[in-house]
Every structure is written in structure tokens, then in C-alpha cells.
Image (cartoon, grey):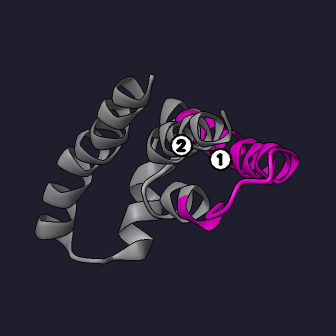
Amino acid sequence: MKYFYGILVVLGVVLPYSQFLPWIIQNGLDMSQLVEEITQTSIGSFAWMDVLVSAIVLIGFILFEGKRNGMRSLWLPIIGTLVVGVSLGLPLFLLLREIHIVKKL
């Protein structure tokens, strides 16, 4: 599972940023334009609200499950979630959890 989660960590960074970086290059860090484009359509707003709720749930899960298992470095998947998104935070947490479980055995 470590390799599977590792691949998903890489994809979780590469795929979202393959769409975001060209936008940044074209528009710069224009936050008002970013928010405008995100909320321009109902389906765009739907997707971003889904991502926001998923990120909040994931951070809660990381904190609860991580502390319950005595894991360290919980800040890594939390920062990954905030900087990239759930696509990085979740597989990174699962990778860290898998490594932690194997070490305990």
C-alpha cells in the first residue's frame, strides 16, 4: 500500500497544479479574479463547496485518527491539504499512517 499511496501523493500534487500553474502564469496571483472565476457558475461553486467541506472533514480525520494512533508529523498532511488540497492531504496521511503501522509491527 505504501507504493500505491506514494503514487497518489505525486498525482495529488501534479494533476491539480497542472491546471493551476498555467492560470497563475496567465493571471498572476489575482485573488479577486480567482474567486470570481470559481463562483462564476453554479457547478463551479458546487465543486468548490464540496472541496471545502472535504478538506475540513479530512483535517478533522487527520487530527483524530493521527492522535489515536500516536502518529507524528500530522502537520504534513494538514499543510498539504491547505496548500494543494484533499488530493494531496488524504493520500499523504494514509501513507504516513501505513508507515507508522508497519513500524509498530
Query: Where does the image place residue 2, in percent across and percent down from the top left?
Result: 42, 30
Disc 2 on helix, strand or loop? helix
Tell me if label 1 and label 2 are in contact, CB under 8 Å. yes
Quadrant location of the N terminus?
A: top left
The front one of 86 and 49 is 86
Residue at 28% over, 36% down? 11
Tally of marks:
2
Task: Look at the image and say whether residue 54 sits in the magenta stretch.
Answer: yes
**Image position of 17 with respect to 4: above or below:** below
Residue at 80% over, 53% down? 70
> Could you tell me the amino acid type at mark 2?
Val
Q: Quadrant of residue 48?
A: top right
Query: Where does the image place residue 23, in percent across and percent down from the top left?
Result: 20, 58
**Image position of 75 with respect to 87: above or below:** below
User: How many neighbours does mark 2 have within 10 angstroms: few (below 14), some (14-19), or many (20 or more)?
Assistant: many
Q: Is residue 31 left or right of residue 81?
A: left
User: How many neighbours does mark 1 have within 10 angstroms: few (below 14), some (14-19), or many (20 or more)?
Assistant: many
Q: CA distance from mark 1 to mark 2?
A: 6 Å
Residue at 23% over, 45% down? 14
Residue under circle 1? Answer: 55
Residue under circle 2? Answer: 86
The front one of 21 and 3 is 3
Q: Is residue 21 left or right of residue 33?
A: left
Task: Look at the image and say whether residue 7 sits in the magenta stretch.
Answer: no
The front one of 56 and 33 is 56
> Could you tell me the amino acid type at mark 1?
Ala
Q: Quadrant of residue 50?
A: top right
Query: Where does the image place residue 66, in percent across and percent down from the top left?
Result: 76, 49
The front one of 101 and 51 is 101
Residue at 21% over, 67% down? 24
Task: Give, as a single range, the part of the protein colored magenta.
Answer: 47-76
